[in-house]
Image (cartoon, rainbow, N blue to C red):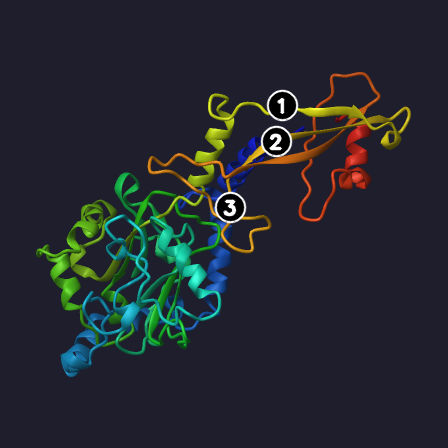
Amino acid sequence: MNRLVLVRACCALVFLAAALVACEPVGGGEQVNSQVDAANDQSEDQVGVELADVDADTQTTEVAEDVLSDTPVEERIAPRFDPDGPGGFYRMPWPMDARRDANGHNILSDFPNRSAGITPKLIAVGESLSGFSTMPVVYIGFTGPMERLPIPAPRETLSATSDVQLLRLGDGCGERVPVLTTAGLKGDQFFPSNTLTVRPVPGFVLKPGATYGLIIRESLGAGGGVALKVPPVFEALRNGEESPLQASFAPLWACLPQAGVEASGVWVASVFTVNDPVAELRTIRDQVRDPQQTPTPTIRDWHLEASLGVEGRYRVYFAEYDTPIYQKGVSPYDSEGGFVFDAQGVPRVQRQETVPMAVMVPESAGPHPVLIWSDGTGASRTSHMSRAVVSQAIDAGFA
């Protein structure tokens, strides 16, 4: 009946919708199978060689060994993995927990062409986050072309023997997320050629707050007869040598044995923690729902608008109330518009705004269930009254 109540109701709907969309990474019967099957079909159009199209007889260690023995080490293809090496932003995989600052925020200071278009605003948002997307794309730069790499289909990435795997780490160790892998993309102003991209199959949303590890196994290169080498920095890391990166990779090394993967066979990897995209809204919701922090607003100027009612069907009442606004800036927020929190993480109300409302009450005997309607930009307090769905709701006994 008022916007404050509406906010409380909408918050619940947002979280319900998120729960419905965020399918479990493994399991789920026919739903999971159909999603992965669809992704398998989609992946056939990707650049690269499908694993299913490669004759198993040609994927022998002999081919790999011959190629390796005939190719000088300096000419072999390697993933870019060196915090101090060449390659700019793509000198290391992204996303990666090791690429966050002391406060846990993402480091994007060397993102390419950061002044182009709306890129500065997007970077500002990215740098304010403590973690990465629930539907990320993982980018791994390589020192040479990758067209010959036998890219596994999404269903195959659920196996412990897959050359590309996205694993949940920590408490969910061993839980695999099916992924779409693309090699051989032509670079553009934001990423270079020879970049491998890996992303979850649409519908498999990563768990907020959870840590994941993407691994690429050496057998991916061997299967395509590609001469490869392990980046020295990563090789030292997987061998347990002391490194500033070791702490962020510890969850991966701890999980691999349980997941049935040999660390010695990993070509390159990235470990990253997922941001909680609704954490701020959840905190505000809790404050709004707490009567000790947000008192129930006072309804003012409640009166009957007789001219708007329909005799025998419904009456219309007008009123107004004040509601807290949490967004910083001036509506409609051509600039700013973000939430403000104090040092303890408590959301700060920016102002109070007077909200006009109209209440349609059926003439039928009550009690009446309540349908809350909130229009968008450009609407008035009576805009909804002419809508067919509102008329149907009134006839069904809703106020």
Name the one closer to the observer, 125 or 201.
Answer: 125
| Residue at the spot of label 3 | 31
| Residue at the spot of label 1 | 298
Mark toward the start of the polypeptide (2 vs 1):
1
> Where residue 308 sits: x, y (%)?
86, 32
Name the one closer to the observer, 242 or 383.
Answer: 383
Residue occupying image coordinates x 67% and y 48%: 377
Marks 3 and 1 sit apart, C-alpha to C-alpha, by 47 Å
Name the one closer to the observer, 10 or 149.
Answer: 10
Q: 366 above or below 385?
A: above
| Label pair 2/1, CB-CB below 8 angstroms | yes
| Mark linked to residue 322 | 2
- Image quadrant occupied by the C terminus: top right
- Looking at the image, the residue that sits furthest to the left is 241
The amino acid type of the residue labelled 3 equals Gln
> Where residue 212 sits: x, y (%)?
31, 49
> Where residue 330 sits: x, y (%)?
56, 48
Query: How busy is the neighbourhood of tag 2: few (under 14 within 10 Å), some, or many (20 plus)?
Result: some
